[in-house]
Amino acid sequence: MKKEDFLLLLNRYLSGDTNLEENNKLLNYYESFQTENDWDEALGSKDELESKMRTRLQNAIQSEEDQVLRIQPFYTKTALKLTAMAASLLLLISISLIVNKTNPLKIETPHVAHKEILIGSDKATLTLEDGSVIALEKGKSYSEGNASSNGEKLVYNSNGETAAIANNLLTIPRGGQFFVQLADSTKVWLNSESQLRYPVAFVDGETRQVELVYGEAYFEVSPSTKHKGSRFKVKTQEQNVEVIGTEFNIKAYRDEPAIYTTLVKGVVAVSNTAKKQVLTPNQQSKITEYNGNIAVAEVDVYNEISWRKGLFVFKGMPLKDIARVLSRWYDVDIVFADPALGNVKFNGVLNKNQKLEDILTTIKNINFINAYEKKDNKIIIK
């Protein structure tokens, strides 16, 4: 692309008058300078250009409405109003290359898929106290006792029970996600490959306890002031989280060595058998299985909980970790022909409603990977 064509295309983009193909051309030309680290001053100030792109993106963000579940938003900062359209535009300014340039890359055409890889969707299985298993998915309704589901969410109504209370188990498979509202009105969003155990009712004045058996969940806890001072606790394999009324995210996957608790709003106390740490907003605790220490650090909350808004946010993340995230959502195994390739780091914001092939092609087109091959339910990165 000539410089003059780039400037014309940029002006059209800033006016909102470009299509996806033209956005990709703009991205490729812009990224060519990112790769070479040699900005052509004839194009003007690089900082000013990036600022204009960000302004264009913010205008797109502000024009969109939150469509998730029609439930009170869990976080109201403008950054969390990103939608699929805004996410695709953000690629123009958020992707940077961190690659080893010692080996020239070859561009190959991806192999044709033998089996369609589906985008993740709302689905779960509900296991009752008596062992009965109910499939929850779009198009299927369920109602029993104080629980009801339209196939996209599960809601428990408070019925004031004080006798022995049964526990339910909600399991979200790879390629799934689900929302549940507990009997105390606490809202829980569960990510792919997660499992939550909880009582079907609570007793006001007594501790409300649930267990994140594994996986990732975002909690919006009903305040203790509405339940005669009842504290709310979340148990995982290596820690306990105690709250009064707050919003936080816990990531405790079985194939990851650490448990992460990220506080969005309020105050929580994270503890294990040895220590206890109190978190304030924008802090994240990390407990590893190696030493049990509770490390606390400031984090960008948006990056940590973007999955709840239908986005993948990868900030300097190795491709092997990105592959693990994508594997859960698309229910596919992703491996690397060369293990060293898994250490290449990638920055980007991608839409969870994209096909996996589109995401891999995006990563490939900006030279992070040479190619990928699909064999049934496996992706081989080359």
Image (tube, helix red, strand yellow):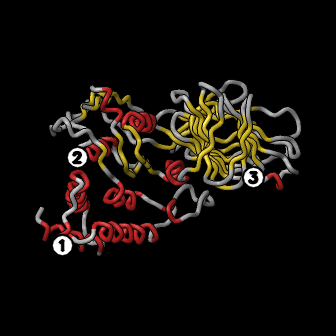
Name the N-terminal-most of marks 2 and 1.
1
Name the residue type under label 1.
Leu
Residues at circles 3 and 2 in contact by the CB criterion of under 8 Å: no
Name the residue type under label 2.
Asn
Query: Which residue is painted at 57% across and 32% down in the image?
Result: 258
Q: Is residue 207 left or right of residue 43?
A: right
Tag 1, which secondary structure?
Answer: helix
Residue 125 in sight in this render: no
Query: Which residue is painted at 44% across and 49% down in the image?
Result: 313
Residues at circles 1 and 3 in contact by the CB criterion of under 8 Å: no
The image quadrant where one finds the N terminus is bottom left
Name the N-terminal-most of marks 1 and 3.
1
Q: Residue furthest left?
A: 2
Q: Quadrant of residue 4?
A: bottom left
Residue for badge 3: 245
Q: Quadrant of residue 162?
A: top right
Query: Which residue is painted at 27% across and 70% down in the image?
Result: 45
Give the class, few, some or many, for how many residues have Cα within 10 Å of label 1's Cα (few <14, many ≥20).
few
Q: Is residue 7 left or right of residue 301?
A: left
Name the N-terminal-most of marks 3 and 2.
3
Residue for badge 2: 365
Residue for badge 1: 8
Residue 333 in sight in this render: yes
